[in-house]
Image (cartoon, rainbow, N blue to C red):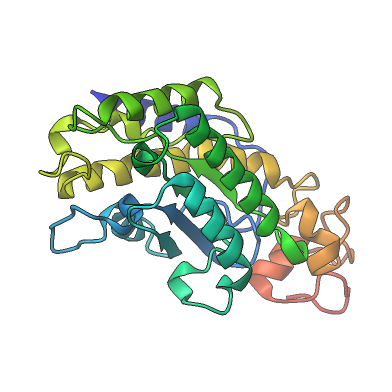
Amino acid sequence: MRRTFFNLILSAFLLAPAAAFSCPLIDGLVDSNCDGVLKIGFAGDSFVKGVGDRSELGGGYVSRIAELYPNAVIVKYPQPGIASGILLSRLIRKVPRMASGPADRDLHDTDVLIIDVGRNDYWEDRNPPNTVGNIRRIVKFLTAALANNGQTPPVIAVTMLAPTNRAFQAPFISAVDSLLVKQRSASLPAYVRADLLRNSLISRDGLHPNALGYADLAQIIKTYLETKGLSRARAICRDNDNDGIFDKFEASKFGTNPALADTDSDGYNDGDEVFTHDTDPTDPNSHP
């Protein structure tokens, strides 16, 4: 039933009139950096690592997202067992140095970034408001840190916490999810509905999904990416002259005029020259 609901939402969204946005889509998603690479990042605890996934594929939902978007670069920063406050501290220390570290953990230049953390806070102070506050601070820090050097920050989303079959931990996770829903906003974008995971798809440890559960979570993430995530990216990446280049990159990256579809008046619009013909959109003598 839930997948039918998701499919209805996705169909309605895709049939809606398209907003004015551009730079070529990759696997149907917005390349918000307009750098020709769709980079999807994940940061969080053992769910990001895929603990509990005993399938041949392994890797949890991250591996399955890589299969669903074969032309994307997938990066992850998994920290099994970590609580939200400690993850924030580690990100503050690590993010500035990530660009020179392991390629699969470099969160710089990501177009989309998914944050999945909070369940291990049960073993810390067991205070749901503190957990939600830490998640909000993680979003704030990453938005600022990944926008350094004039880069476009990723469209960040927070996952709701998947349910647990551990009776002792369930009230805490439920309380965190309730606060994430109540406080959902631009500064706390808790749009990935991992809370809808069926309890029957949780592994024997009572917390982590099994292989089918991770496959289900991958579909939930896919639904976000292709609906709410896509609309959020479109809102950021405007193309008011409809030339095929995001307004924010016209002057800074390509030297083109954001108010003119054909900057050099050679009869070819700027986006076609940049992305299709590899010619100079500012030189009337350089055209296909």
**In this image, 147 relative to 67: left or right?**
right
Q: Nearer the viewer, residue 216 or 130?
A: 130
**Point 51% across, 33% down: residue:** 130
Q: Is residue 67 visible?
A: yes
**Point 18% across, 54% down: residue:** 53
Q: Is residue 271 above or below residue 278?
A: above
Quadrant containing the C terminus is: bottom right
Q: Nearer the viewer, residue 192 or 115?
A: 115
Residue 8 at what x, y percent from top left?
A: 36, 26
Q: Nearer the viewer, residue 158 or 253?
A: 158
Occupied quadrant, residue 42? bottom left
**In this image, 24 relative to 176: left or right?**
right
Residue 157 at what x, y percent from top left?
A: 51, 42
Q: Nearer the viewer, residue 3 or 26?
A: 3
Q: Residue furthest left?
A: 204
Q: Is residue 249 above or below residue 279?
A: above
Q: How many marks?
A: 0
Occupied quadrant, residue 148? bottom right
**Point 57% across, 47% down: residue:** 138
Residue 36 at what x, y percent from top left?
A: 59, 67
**In this image, 74 relative to 81: left or right?**
right
Q: Is residue 108 visible?
A: no
**Point 57% across, 34% down: residue:** 188
Quadrant containing the N terminus is: top left
Residue 48 at what x, y percent from top left?
A: 35, 54
